[in-house]
Amino acid sequence: MSGMYFSRITLDKTAGNAALSSLLDPEDRAKAMDAHHRLLWTLFADSADRERDFLWRAGKGGTFYVLSRREPVPHPLFLPPEVKEFAPVLAAGDRLTFSLRANATKDRAIVSRLSKHERGGKSRRVDVVMDLLKKLPEGSDRSVERRRLAEQAALDWMTGQAGRGGFKLSAVRVEDYSVVQLNRPGAGKSNSIVTLGVLDLTGEIEVTEPERFVEKLSQGFGRGKAFGFGLMLIRRA
């Protein structure tokens, strides 16, 4: 696969943009996700009907990592993008460490079989950690169980991703699990808020099918990609 670019993009916080800092990079996590998703789009939306063909992840201090099929265009709100071609040379058996921020979901079989009208606004998918938390017996200490269930859900979900993504999972660790609520664009008052689980994962994998794995990297993992989920950052182990 060719024609991919990996970029490090940083907000320009010099005097001209300083007054916009609270709008461009809010402290509130939900507001930041929404602001960042709009900001990153300005680097790639070269036409009104353009569909998103890039993945991104927020770093620290107004820095973003982006994997895209086109080079980002310069923008006055950002420093000049640092861009390089993304063409990893991989072979079966290569071991890599990874970092991934994911909105990990799975299909709810019963709801998925219903028509849109029958679902009555219920999502066909459920966050994998939330699903396990809902199954806890009454009286369980959710704060205690949360970490254990997040680890279990992450292992199961990443194992499934590996089976479809050209790699084998060697180890996965949950660095953090949290929940964020975002406004859903264009939604009515009754369903204007969407709740997303945020799984921050690190671990180690073994490449089994290099071409398939690189293709999966370009597609991303899980859902919520417009809001900074799904970009797997890799290094050789």
Image: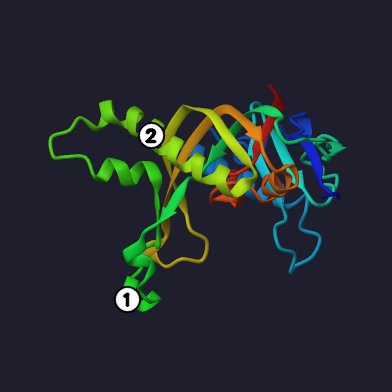
In the image: residue 41, left or right of residue 130: right
Residue at point 65%, 51% (across, down): 38
In-image side of 191 versus 57 (left or right)? left
Q: Nearer the viewer, residue 6 or 61?
A: 6
The circle on residue 163 is none
Above/below status of 119 relative to 99: below
User: Which residue position is annotated with label 1?
Assistant: 118
Question: Helix or strand or loop: what does disc 2 sit on?
Answer: helix
Taking the image as drawn, is residue 28 in sight? Answer: no
Classify residue 210 by image quadrant.
Answer: top right
Residue at the extreme top: 237
Q: Which residue is mark 2?
A: 152
Nearer the observer, 54 or 112: 112
Q: How many marks?
A: 2
Q: Residue furthest left?
A: 139
Quadrant of image for the C terminus: top right
Percent position of residue 86, x then y: 82, 40
Give the camera-side residue of 80 and 98: 98
Height in image: 135 above or below 199? below
Q: Amino acid at mark 1?
A: Glu
Task: Look at the numbered disc 1 and give the secondary structure of its residue.
Answer: helix
Q: Give the residue at x 71% y 63%.
A: 51
Q: Residue at x 53, y 41 (%)?
A: 102
Whole-percent x, y for residue 127 in the image: 40, 48
